[in-house]
Structures are given as C-alpha cells and as structure tokens.
Amino acid sequence: MFEHLDESVIPIIGQSMEQKLEWVRSDFWVGYTRADEILGYLDDLMHYPKSIRMPCALLVGEPGNGKSTIVEEFSSRHEVTFKETGEPIMPVLVMDMPSRPKDSEFYSQILFALKVAHKTSDGVESKKDQAHRMLLALQTRIVILDEFHDILHCTSREQRAFLSVLKKLTNLLKIPVVGVGT
C-alpha cells in the first residue's frame, strides 16, 4: 500500500499529527553526489597516515549551500566512542573559528569545543599545552574550523600569524585541519 514511500517514513504514518510535525521539522540528511564526494574526501583526510606535512583542506561555498550540514553529517558519522577503560575517543573536533584569529582565542575555542574547563585569562602557552594534550588524549584525527572566512576580517599580518598557528598545530600533532567558510 505504501510502496511508493521510503521505508523510514512508514512508521510515521500512524502517528499523531503532532508527532508527524515533529518528525518533519527535525534535521535529516539528504545525500547527493557532491556532498558524498566531500564526505569521502574528509574520511580520506581523517585516515591519512601521520606524516611530516599533513594535508589540510578548505571547503568553500556560498552561504546556505550546506557546508555546515556536510560537516555535521561527517561529525555524526564519527561520534565520540569510549575505550573499555571508559576513556573517550573523539576522532573529529568541529569548532567555530575565533572571532579574532589570535593564538589565545584559538586555543580557548578548542578547549570550549572539547568542553574543557579553563580560564580565558590563562596564558597562551598554558592553553596551547592543555589543548594539545587533550587532542592527543582524545585521539582526535581531524580538526574542522567552521566560519573560516572570519580570517578575512583581519590584517594580512594577523592572517599570516594565525595560519602559522594552524601549521604548527597540524605539524606537531599530525592532525589535518579543514577550514569551512564562504
């Protein structure tokens, strides 16, 4: 009777109107060729063998084209798991680009994304050390910076300094960094 419908929809048919509306309004993934290619590329980056110069990437597109949705889908496919000892493994860290690309704000953003308590007034080296230790302990394999285009709102000197911070992060920890923005 409902052969024309996708299997995931059939259980919803008998539910109340309120439940149907909740289901329709919920987030869901609609895959398409280019998005699947990007997800495959991100998977390749995440599983790239550790090397002296880790590859990084930039995902650029117009506003509203689904960049953040692709990142969310990628992250949901690589959720936090736990070792037998109870220690978490977080293969993907998705975070927002700091509003100003300064070392201190960047490391605070990492710590906020990891839900690590810290003082924003702590020195750069302290936050950097804490962020590096957490990324290693969590076995993070890829860092994704959403709203990467915010780097364009600063001077070229600040841009170079921030890109140097990213380069050091990826070279030291052997973790690819992916910038996502317009």
Image: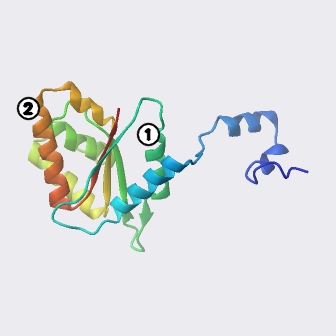
User: Depth check: 46 or 13 in front?
Assistant: 46
Marked residue nearer the N-terminal end (1 or 2)? 1
Which residue position is annotated with label 1? Answer: 68
Q: Residues within 10 Å of mark 2 (few under 14, many from 20)?
A: few
Can you name the residue that lies furthest to the bottom here?
A: 84
Q: Position of residue 22 (x, y in %)?
A: 69, 36
The residue lying at 43 percent from left, 59 percent from top is 80
- Side (left or right) of 17 relative to 111: right
Q: Which x, y percent locates residue 54?
A: 22, 60
Quarter residue 91 falls in: bottom left
Res. 150 image quadrant: top left
What is the residue that sits farthest to the front in this orientation?
33
The residue carrying mark 2 is 157
Residue in the image at 37% along x and 55% along y: 92
Is 138 left or right of 41, judged from the image as shown? Answer: left
Q: Position of residue 41 (x, y in %)?
A: 39, 56
Please name the residue shown 40% across and 71% down the image: 83
Q: Does the image show residue 181? A: yes
Res 109 label:
none
Query: Where's residue 90, x and y in %?
Result: 37, 59
User: In the image, what residue type sits under mark 2?
Assistant: Arg
